[in-house]
Amino acid sequence: MKIKINNKEFDCKKGEVILDVALRNGIKIPAVCRHSDLEPQNSCRLCLIEIKGKGIYTSCSTKVENGMEVTTESAEIKRLRRVNLELLFAQHIEQCNECNWSYKCRLLKLAKNYNIKITKFNDRKKGFPTHQFGPSIIFDSSKCIDCKNCIAMCQKQGVGFLEIKQKDGFFCTVSNKEKECVYCGQCITHCPSGAFEEVSSIKEVENVLKKGNVIFQFAPAIRSSIGEEFGLPYGSITTGKLVTALKKLGAKKVFDVSFSADITTIEEGKELIERLSKNKNLPMFTSCCPSWVRYVEVYRPELIKHLTSVRSPHIILGGLIKMSEDNPIVVSIMPCTSKKYEVTREELMIDGVKPVDYVLTTREIGRMIRKNKIDFDQLEESELDYPWGEPTGAGVIYGASGGVMESALRTVYQKMTGKRLKDINLKAVRGLKGVKEAEIEIGKRKVKVAIINGLGNIEGFDYKKYDYIEVMACPGGCIGGGGQPIPINNEIRKKRAESLYNIDKKKKIRQAHENPFVEKAYKEYLNNKKIIHKICHTTYGNNKNK
Amino acid sequence: MDILEKLKASELKGRGGGAFSTALKWELVKKAKGKNKYVICNASEGEPNVFKDKYILDNYLPDVINGINLAVDFIKAKDAYIYLNKNYNLKGSVGKCIVFKKTSGYIGGEETAAVEAIEGKRAEPRIKPPFLTEVGLFNCPTLMNNVETFYYVSKIDKGEYNKTRFYSINGDVSNEGVYELPIDMPIFDILKQTGNYPDFDFFAQVGGGASGEIMLPQELKVPAFGAGSITIYNKKTTDIYALMEKWAEFFHTGNCDKCTPCREGAFRIYEMIKNRDINYEVLDDIFFNLKKSSFCALGRSIPLPFESLIKKVK
Ligand code: SF4
Ligand code: SF4
Ligand code: SF4
Ligand code: FES
């Protein structure tokens, strides 16, 4: 099929919308409310184009037809976009310094390009309230431009915490008092106006940094996304630069949570083998995604007994750091807003001490680095600190959907058969499909596994057929986490994940149980059952209404 | 002659305001493929000064139901719904029809929004295409007609149709009411014949009490259009700003708030008029965007009453 845009012919496929054809071919059309994860909302009315013989249409929702002739710029289109922009700003209270979009803001860029006065109208939403959902999410309704993406995304997540209510002549985005938020932060990454954001811990971290005993640990998924905070291409791997930047901010040491992902893998592997041998509480579900755990506790308590008791990697490493360092303050840098909630869970305390003191999202650490005028791209690369700085490939791929499963299977296979998996690249569990499944023969047993990529896919899923299931609330896994740089879409998720798999491919050691530092940890710290239990395992079920 | 032939011969057009050929619509749904099919009678009548559907339901319910049943038989529908204005009550049997009381405002009467509402969702218009005739209620081909249309379907089937329609007449008149008169009768004649032609200087709003066009006495040589309402305003005693404020409030509170020009535009129109502080340049910008960039027909129809009033009466 072919269409003409601005008098040039382009190939396109049936079912595509005009906007996608234009963008693919480098033709710019402003589109603010469109998110490729969701059905078009048709809300902002900026993506207007003219179809010859038919008139003005929105390109985000109008499908191509063979021979269609489209114009993307004209005096009329310009006027329409200008006025709609003015009207959008009339309801949006700008707080650009603190905003998740800040220098990447499409609205501000458009305001400049279209030369509009953003203060033409008085602010209709002046004084509109700010809401906080648990320790993770902030919703400043005075910034909202009513596109409803957050509501659609929350529904897609199977939560439905956000909804529309009529107030003073307007339909507004509100939270449903009967429901609970699971803190996945997908509303944040799908909001075009910065109305949703994380509860910030920047101030607290700045304060403790002055004391000099702060240890940073960062999640597997950060290394391939943090660069975006400084304008680097999607998927850039900047592990060494990040270490340097964190040292400049005043970190005493910097550790890698991929390392403790290897410990999670080993502990979870042990538990799976035990459950398989006893055929008890199968399938076993992963538990390193706190939004998933919260979802189970609030909405599916019958699944609690299926969750592995193993703690998530940064909690385990936090515990190790607290054991091995002198009076440290542990700050986790996470792709996730839900980790802010996770660290408040009381059953994770070790003898009254929190394993992790603060959590910053990728975006927050990006903001701190920018605020300190550190030129990230120009930084030298530094090594991670000894001894918790050397992960295996298995630990790194934890950041992508399917990664936990792949790491676990590599190790479980070895433990159960005494042999190495022939091809440790388990391609079937990788990728962005919402539900993935595989069956592998381990010794005499056929182990059936599934991966739920995006929380909404668990609804109606027939889990009983499987032995082991990974669930990540965020589409794509942590590389698409609610704390990650925006924008996020499938193309970007792919690039971030690819980079992690490339690291894995190049690593000499790619299996958790072969990590010499893991051995060290078990020898020197985790050397009896009681301690292992304390540092590496937890319980569920007491957190319904937090 | 089967019902379709009769509809074709009658040249009946939809009486909800859209004036789409009824025979054609029926044919489209009949031909559409789907697991099930549905019939919906739109009785949401949500605009001020339009009350002819209520009149028909109160007085001729059996004919309306007969019209619906003819449609059910013709397209082999699984169910038929009556999508009813929440303030209306049906006095009499509705047969097998399912009555759904509409809950949301003006926008709830838009046909795709009505379908969303019956499906249990928020009454918000859908993107078209696909049209309801292909993908309607529960994703099945759906035939939606207005109350008056179904009434006339019944009349046509019985051979009792004389090319008439129902007019709601009110405002500064002595004989407010609903009248059944020929479809092509000029407004001037309608007013004369019903004893409602004013003996004072006036203007009329035709086709809907909010979205209808303002017409001056010398313009009334044409038939009525839209939902067939005629509202008379005494030019001397009518406060046109108060009138515009009423419309503006109606649109601002009755729309669905989905798209920027309608949500924000209707609000700003209301704000300027309420404060009697109208910037005509801004107003013109907003009208332009409403007409050209609104998501649905409701938004696109907002400027007409204001523009015609400002041009002709102010
Ligand atoms: S979205 Fe954020 S950066 Fe953009 S104008 Fe609004 S407050 Fe400013
Ligand atoms: S964090 Fe997740 S569950 Fe909570 S409002 Fe946002 S999308 Fe919904
Ligand atoms: S909060 Fe953001 S995503 Fe939600 S409706 Fe408002 S602008 Fe859209
Ligand atoms: S991007 Fe098309 S209407 Fe917003």
Image (cartoon, rainbow, N blue to C red):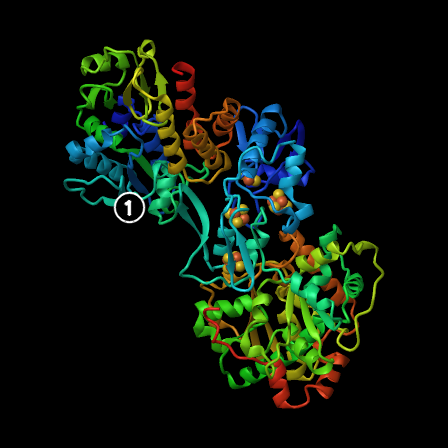
- For numbered disc 1, what is the local secondary structure? loop
Picture coordinates of residue A103, whole percent (x, y): 69, 46
Can residue A149 be seen in the rendering of this structure? no
Question: Residue A252 vs residue A66: left or right?
Answer: right
Picture coordinates of residue A58, whole percent (x, y): 54, 35
Picture coordinates of residue A40, whole percent (x, y): 52, 43
For the N terminus of chain B, give its image quadrant. Answer: top left
Q: Residue at x 38, y 43 (%)?
A: B123
In the image as oriented, which residue stretches furthest toward the right? A380
Of residues A448 and B118, the one drawn nearer to the viewer in this rendering: B118
For the C terminus of chain B, give its image quadrant. Answer: top left
Q: Residue at x 42, y 18 (%)?
A: B310
Which residue carries the number 1 mark? B78
Can residue B184 be seen in the rendering of this structure? yes
Of residues A457 and A12, the one drawn nearer to the viewer in this rendering: A457
Picture coordinates of residue B125, whole percent (x, y): 42, 39
Would you identify the image quadrant in which residue A264 lies?
bottom right
Q: How many marks?
A: 1
Q: Residue at x 80, y 54 (%)?
A: A375
Question: Residue B34 vs residue A210: left or right?
Answer: left
Up-down relation of residue A86 to residue A502 (above or below): above
Q: Please, what is the three-letter code of the amino acid marked with disc 1?
A: Lys
